Amino acid sequence: MRFSLGNRNSLYSFEACVIEAIRSRLDPEAATRLQAQIDSINKVQRLTDGKEVDLYRVAHGKPSFDDSLRFPQGEEEALLGTVHLTHPGNPVTLKAEAWLVSGRLFSLVFDKPPKQFFAGYALDAVRPGVKDVTVWMDPMRGRPKGDEVPVDPGTLTGWMRELSISGQLTDTRAPLVGPQRAALIAQIDAQLPPDYLELIEQMDGARTGKCRIHGLTSVRKVVQDDDNFS
């Protein structure tokens, strides 16, 4: 990939390495579109000590992105891929996630501050290795989703059936099939509660009163200084 380095509006080599590792594992059409998206970026913003890297195309002082470069059926947010980078001097790894927003690559999320991980190395020159790469979805097709229709209460069992029949559980959506559900669970770096795991077997999210129970397709990543949360 072609990236200039050395200023705040450019990607560091290790950041570019993450994108290239994912791009090289996409089908040609998706890889070409991802390259076109990256070629259009002219502003890089780093937040939370470099753990979140946001990518922009700015024109006349405002964000401006060519919609023809977006992946079709783009969701609000979706995890495209995960890459583990290896440290040049020891076996520890740095985990990086590449997130799409509305059909384009928008952010890279690291599990540790890169400056801390690469201490002693210049960020604009360090060359890590790639331990492994996981591409979670075909960006030309989008993530799997449950049916956009309410679940028939008659198909529910246990406490979910009781709450649904009584009207306490509403706006339910059909669950993802087993392999799709397992793939999305694997993206979450957290121990999910047993009752939530039970719920997503029967529905991909619901509403109870004024509260929304997000399904797996709505899980988002929040980056903070001390840790990242799903």
Image (tube, helix red, strand yellow):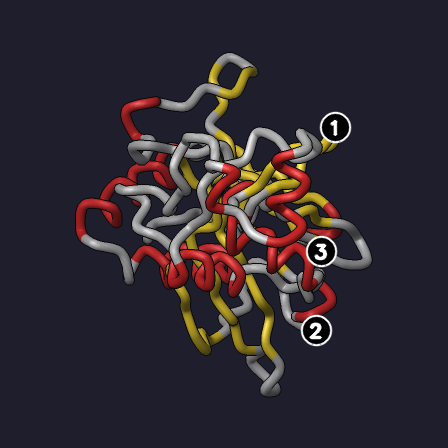
Q: Position of residue 212 (x, y in %)?
A: 68, 34
User: In whole angstroms, how far apart are the C-alphas of marks 2 and 3?
Assistant: 24 Å
**Other residues around mark 3 within 10 Å, as few (<14) / some (14–19) / many (≥20):** some
Q: Position of residue 52 (x, y in %)?
A: 64, 48
Q: Left or right of 227: which side holds 206?
A: left
Tell me, yes or no, if residue 18 can be seen here: no
Q: How many marks?
A: 3
The numbered dot on residue 209 is 1
Q: Position of residue 71 (x, y in %)?
A: 31, 35
Direction top: furthest residue: 60
Cβ atoms at labels 2 and 3 below 8 Å apart: no
Residue shown at 47%/45% (left/top)? 155
**Res. 146 image quadrant:** top left
Secondary structure of the residue carrying numbered label 1: loop
Judging by the rendered image, the residue that carries numbered circle 2 is 120
Direction right: furthest residue: 226
Residue shown at 28%/42% (left/top)? 141
Q: Position of residue 225 (x, y in %)?
A: 80, 53
Residue shown at 51%/50% (left/top)? 202
